[in-house]
Amino acid sequence: MTMEIDDLKGPIGEARELVEAYIKPVLTSISDPTGGVVAPFAMTPSGAHVIPAKAFDDYRPQPVRRIGVAHLTSLDSIIAHALRFKDEDSAIFANDDRKAPSLTVVLDYHRIGADSDPRFGQHRAHFAFPLSDEWTAWTEQDGQQMRMVEFAEFLEDRIIDVLYVIPEEDELSDDLKKFINAGGGEATIATPQRLVELARGLQVHESSAVREVRNLSTGEAQISFTSEHTDANGEPLRIPGLFLIGIPVFRNGPIYRIAARLRYRKTPTGVVFWYDLWRTDRVFDHAFKESCERAEVETELPLFFGKPE
């Protein structure tokens, strides 16, 4: 059975036209009453559907605005990036969390002034400060008791970080001088050579306490009990109370001097050594502040401590 063309113009055709008219989307637009922005909508039987601006992105000669976050891996790079894209309203935000310090540049930050137009704040640059390997190594072992062999291995691995201080000649900060003087003066500071001697088998004696001698090259160990502190030659044993290290806080950053108290204790199982780094919080804050000041000066942008909204 064939359907004549006249049939399509009859009731069936009318019904089809009604269905098509019902399901056919109607394009319209709605204006924002607060700002006058016009948004296109498609009206369908299921409701009104906004047509996103992104649907037209492939047909534009260039993006409407810059959007995205550039993740930089050096302070030099985030400064250069800011200089490339900044305008008079860009701003820097410094997150001073010691566990995750970072800088964020909001290149399209809100314009200055309460009555000025706000902006999207979607074009940014971010730099997460990488801690140096030296800083990580020393702070992870800070205050951790180690057997002589462990302490020896650690010192031999990090001996290049230990500073040789020349009394009355090396310039030290006032706070560091006060700390050193309170501990007995510069004469108590261990040299790298002295720490190597400790690492290679310093003998510690005490009544009813353990003496342990450990030589890394041979693996030999000897334990005995004695009555007083003496060294290998029977002389009274003197263990330096302090040593200094020079390490960067951040990777490829400047070197900072840090004092460390040298500690030891005799236990039933052997002699343990450890060190206590002095005021690493101050050192960290100073290093972070210097980096922030450099970014602020070189970019000529305002800097705020915290996170952007």
Image (cartoon, rainbow, N blue to C red):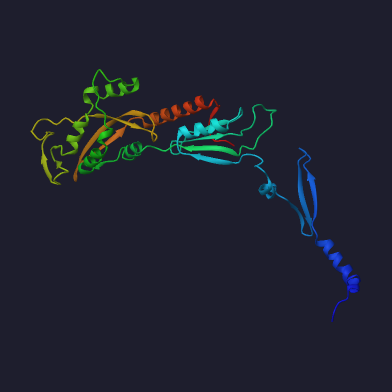
Residue 188: x and y in percent read 22, 25
Residue 103: x and y in percent read 50, 34
Q: Residue furthest bottom?
A: 1
Q: Nearer the viewer, residue 221 or 295?
A: 295
Q: Nearer the viewer, residue 108 or 48?
A: 108
**Residue 308 occupies quadrant:** top right
Q: Is residue 108 above or below residue 49?
A: above
The residue lying at 19 percent from left, 46 percent from top is 269
Total numbered labels placed on residues in the image: 0
Residue 131: x and y in percent read 39, 37
Q: Is residue 90 above or below residue 11?
A: above
Q: Residue furthest top?
A: 168
Q: Nearer the viewer, residue 26 or 223?
A: 26
Looking at the rendering, in which quadrant would you find the C terminus? top right
Judge left or right: residue 203 versus residue 189.
left
Judge left or right: residue 240 versus residue 125.
left
Residue 29: x and y in percent read 79, 47
